[in-house]
Amino acid sequence: MSQNLLLRVANKRLIAESVVLIDLKSGSNTKLPAFSAGSHLQFELPGGLKRAYSLCNAPNEGDIYQIAVQLEPASRGGSLAVHKEIHVGDVITASLPQNLFPLDETVCHSILIAGGIGITPLISMAKRLESISKSWELHYATRTVERCAFKSEIESGFMANHTQLYFDQGGGPKLDFDELFQKKTNTSHVYVCGPSGFIDLVLTKAKDMGWTSDQLHYERFGSNPLESKTDRAFTVVLARSGMTLEVPAERSVMHVVLDAGIDLPVSCEQGICGTCITDVISGRPDHRDQCLDDSLRMTSFTPCCSRSLDDELIIDL
């Protein structure tokens, strides 16, 4: 990370099954940089891991950052480190706030849709929208009521009248996208965050109902895309370096390129920050990032997590 923050863990508590909420304050007696709703921090965790987590508190709370982290059953170490190895009083290193999921505060109405731990940036958005007296609604789906983070805060405060909760198990209302997206107007926008399958469903339903890409905003949460069982080996050709490299099924383009001695700027290693974006000259990337829009995906990819749909991918390195 080119610029770092030192953050002290001021509080850590369980707010739902397998979800901890962490309060972070300045660890260097300096003022915390401002952030906007939808922002995230990249953290340096025990074991040399780097992970990005969304800020979930109100942007006007200038003396604190809050993150909520769900312990994933198949954790690659990030969520496990947060739950088991980070304690109150610890000082951890993080990036400056970054925002790849910005909130358009000019629209008349915002529909916030969360799946699971994808609620984190949307909580911050809800707080921001309420503070500037904008119209909004929140739809939040989890597997069970026990896994519903922020449930007590939502039900006991200002969010209660704007929010509908849905649980896959245990009865209750089900999220009806047909009914929801019938509310379309040219001055409404949708924000969705959660697992990839959930986001894909929301976007497909919205587009089927006439919502345009400009009205739809998303950020994905989920497991490492490199863990897909369909991964296969392929060849990457570095056009400028004149090198041809084999990328095994279990390794990323990034690691193969770095091992070959080629300089490649990297940071999050999850396709979130966009630091490693590289131009593609030939071949079809298998995009697994969370930072490129559709236009950039025509000409670029993220070697930290994306792969190739073809046997050979030629890139501008």
Image (tube, grey):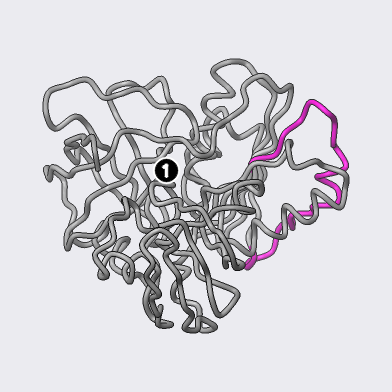
Q: Residue 189 at x, y = what percent? A: 72, 34
User: Would residue 249 be found to the left or right of residue 32 on screen?
Assistant: right
- Residue 16: within the magenta? no
The residue located at (39%, 81%) in the rendering is 250
Query: In the rendered view, would you say 311 is above or below 200?
Result: below
What is the quadrant of the C terminus in the image?
bottom left
User: Would residue 46 be found to the left or right of residue 138 on screen?
Assistant: left
Query: In the rendered view, would you say 66 is above or below 173?
Result: above
User: Would residue 36 be found to the left or right of residue 280 on screen?
Assistant: left
What is the quadrant of the N terminus in the image?
top left
User: What amino acid type is highlighted by mark number 1?
Assistant: Ser
- Residue 177: within the magenta? yes
Given residues 244 and 306, the one toward you in this image is: 244
Q: Residue 309 at x, y = what percent? A: 60, 74
Find the magenta span and give its range. Answer: 168-191
* Residue 311 location, quadrant: bottom right
Q: Residue 155 at x, y = what percent? A: 55, 39
Tell me the SS state at disc 1. Answer: strand
Given residues 301 and 150, the one toward you in this image is: 301
Q: Residue 176 at x, y = what percent? A: 80, 54
Query: In the rendered view, would you say 210 is above or below 187?
Result: below
The residue that disc 1 covers is: 54
